[in-house]
Amino acid sequence: RVVRNGAGIEGVSVASFGPDQQSMTITASDGSFTLADLAAGPTRVSLRKEDDLIMEQRNLTAPARDVVIDLPPGGKVSGRVIDKATRKPVPAFQAGISASRNTGSMMMMMPPLQRSFTSDDGTFTLENVPTGAVNLVVSAPGYSTGRKGGLTLEEGKALSDVEVELEPGVKLVGRVTAPDGSPVAGAQVRFTPSGNVRMTATMFNDGRATTDAAGEYVLDGLEPGEKSFEFTHEKYVNARKTVDLKGSETRLDVRLEGGLRVTGMVVTDAGAAVADASVEAYSTGFGRSAKTDANGNFTFETLDAGRYTFRAMKAGYAPGKVEDVDVQAGAPVRISLRRGGVIYGHVSGLAEADYANAVVEASAPAGQTSAAVDSSGNYRIEGAPDGSVRVLATVMTRDYSSRKTSQPKTVQMEVAGSQQVDLEFRTDVVVRGRITRDGRPLSAATVSFYPRGRSQTMVSIPADEQGMYSASGLEDGEYSVMVMDTQRITPYQTTYQVRGSATFDIDYRTTSVHGRVVDAATGDPVHDAAIQLRPSLREGMVSSRMAVTDSTGSFAIDFVPAGTYVATAEKEGYGNEARTISVAEGSAPDLDFRISRNDGILLTVVDARDGRPIAAMARVTDAAGQVVYEPNFRGGDSTDPIRLPLGVGTFTVTVSANGYADQTLTLRSPSRQNVALTRGGTIIVRSRASTPRRIRILNPNGTPYTTGWMRRDSFAIDASPATITLPNLVAGTYTLQALGDNDAVLDQTKVVVVDDQTVTVDL
């Protein structure tokens, strides 16, 4: 049953997760439910009822009877909705709470939970509002979405007389046409904010539309100001347009371009056609896929201009790849596949039921192949790549709530060779404990152990309703430990040294961080400003927290663990403000930001060879080395200039793009800059050690060289004959260090990197 204060709740949607665990039902009048046809074992269950503001998750184990899911009572929020200009009540509207989710390094926006209200005086009352930081969301026809943040609700308490102001929205209309001027029906139009300002409710309240048969579209209730929109259709190249929304209606007509038609062929190394092969084409952004026909031919109809990597795969063959193809040249792409090798063996150390969810992967720089494990623990991979190949077994539950890996092994594969590789999941080490937050068991949490140093196994498991967890299969060594509350998706990070089986209780205290953002010149509140808290010590997994200001400029971030953070406020059109703050148990400073209008830095990023724009990202640090700007996710294929919303000053900017070497520059804000990226060079490191190690790269000035989305300055490498490939390094002289326990330097060597060349190092 689903109950609150002992009473059953009717009409709650109850569903299980996972491709083989899809079961859904609705609770009866007494709150009772049955989820049938589940596989035995753990399953994650979601509960949703929008009118009652219910959006919960629970970790359960099937089979089970008489399960009682007791939802917290929450509190009450009441107030009224008014027109900001006239101060008159808005009689018909939807009010509820935002459903934003922090996922460590990015903010996900979920559709808000709202109820419909009709009242002459614009009043509303929301019952059972989850406690903690409250962010109200109100929408009404003809108005842009209104929010009220900076509120904190205690269990069993009430917030009264909350006033939410709505402003008339802007209607965006337009027509999407093909290159010949004909209408394009079925084109998708969506709001695409840039940088960290990607969290407004516009994304879910009329922030997207589809063109009709005449190619027309309408987006209503948008907030005024300069905004970007993306127009997509499978037959045309994506278009991104920026428009200044003002008045009651703005028009934006868009013509989509047909793109380039690129053809090619997949053949064996002997020249024979390979039918039904999968082909991927990807540039600096997202990729597209195709299949070869009976003659081995493939076609991409609408690729944008640029340089692409083409990769082909088929069972029984090692993956083939062709890099840095300029598709504007018009030459057919030819991808050669070699007959792959065979890796087979036995996987041990799993429970009988886990074998159905186990997969073995064989990976090398050219690509990876995989195979399922049968009920006896045996597997066979055909089409394994040659060279140094890393073999690893992974088991993941059907609901994705649990994942663990075996100890990896590295083998040297000959072309079309065959090797037996047996893999083992350790069962002799078990780390158990209880997760509590603010003195209460953290139910519906997931705890993950990510290896650091020489340890190589990884485990991610759910905690039960009492916060208890049990992680088996870990090697001795140091781990980054991430606790993720699956209710609010709030992260907490710590470290743990595994030395055999032990009890590891994770107890942490949190507080709420409140504040306000105003315009430094006028003192007016700044709404829709993005607030981000980044841990000042950025080790292991990233665990940032984020929020958005409401119409009064206020914000609140709940469940913030004690620690030191860099707090940043930013909004398009303003220079951001960053400061270092300390959050103690039970207390945190109020954050008052004063940001000034400033153009910041506008970066145009191009390929150094031909000057063509490329899709890139940028990360910014201040004079103290603290991160003051970084985008929420890596990816996207927009080649538009990057606007960095920085205040006046001098900053260090690192520009990155897939397939190119990072470039770090010292730039002044405000300014406009052109950045030309090269492909850089490549280092191949071959291990000559008998145990796993980490490899650290030092710049010519002796500082750690960081690369990748996680900004890693070290890389794990297995024992000999393992190799790792470090591509796209800026030309220069580096120091490579082999690290042992506690980062002790066991071996080191100097390496000279040259653009477009590869150097191999034994370490």
Image (tube, rainbow, N blue to C red):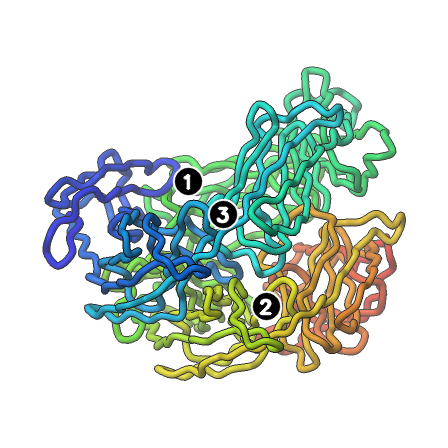
Q: Residues within 10 Å of mark 2 (few under 14, many from 20)?
A: many
Q: Which type of secondary structure does the marked residue at label 2 adopt?
A: strand
Residue type at mark 3: give it: Gly
Q: Residue at x 57, y 30 (%)?
A: 211
Image mark for residue 692: none
Q: Residues within 10 Å of mark 3 (few under 14, many from 20)?
A: many
* Percent coordinates x, y for residue 161 in the rendering: 28, 68
Q: Earlier in the sequence, mark 1 or mark 2?
A: 1
Q: Residues within 10 Å of mark 1 (few under 14, many from 20)?
A: many
Image mark for residue 221: 3
Viewer-side label of 3, 1:
3
Q: Which type of secondary structure does the marked residue at label 3 adopt?
A: strand
Q: Residue at x 38, y 75 (%)?
A: 512
Viewer-side label of 1, 2:
2
Task: Kindly identify which residue carries mark 2.
Answer: 570
* Percent coordinates x, y for residue 114 in the rendering: 33, 50
Question: Compared with residue 478, is residue 660 higher up or lower down, i.e. above or below?
Answer: above
Q: Residue at x 79, y 68 (%)?
A: 671
* Percent coordinates x, y for residue 47 in the rendering: 27, 48
Q: Which type of secondary structure does the marked residue at label 1 adopt?
A: loop
Apparent side of residue 302 relative to residue 542 in the rendered image (left or right): right
Q: CA distance from mark 3 to mark 1?
A: 57 Å
Apparent side of residue 473 relative to residue 579 in the rendered image (left or right): left
Q: CA distance from mark 2 to mark 3?
A: 23 Å
Residue 467, quarter of picture: bottom left
Contact between marks 1 and 2 (CB within 8 A): the answer is no
Image mark for residue 377: 1
Question: Compared with residue 250, is residue 210 higher up or lower down, i.e. above or below?
Answer: above
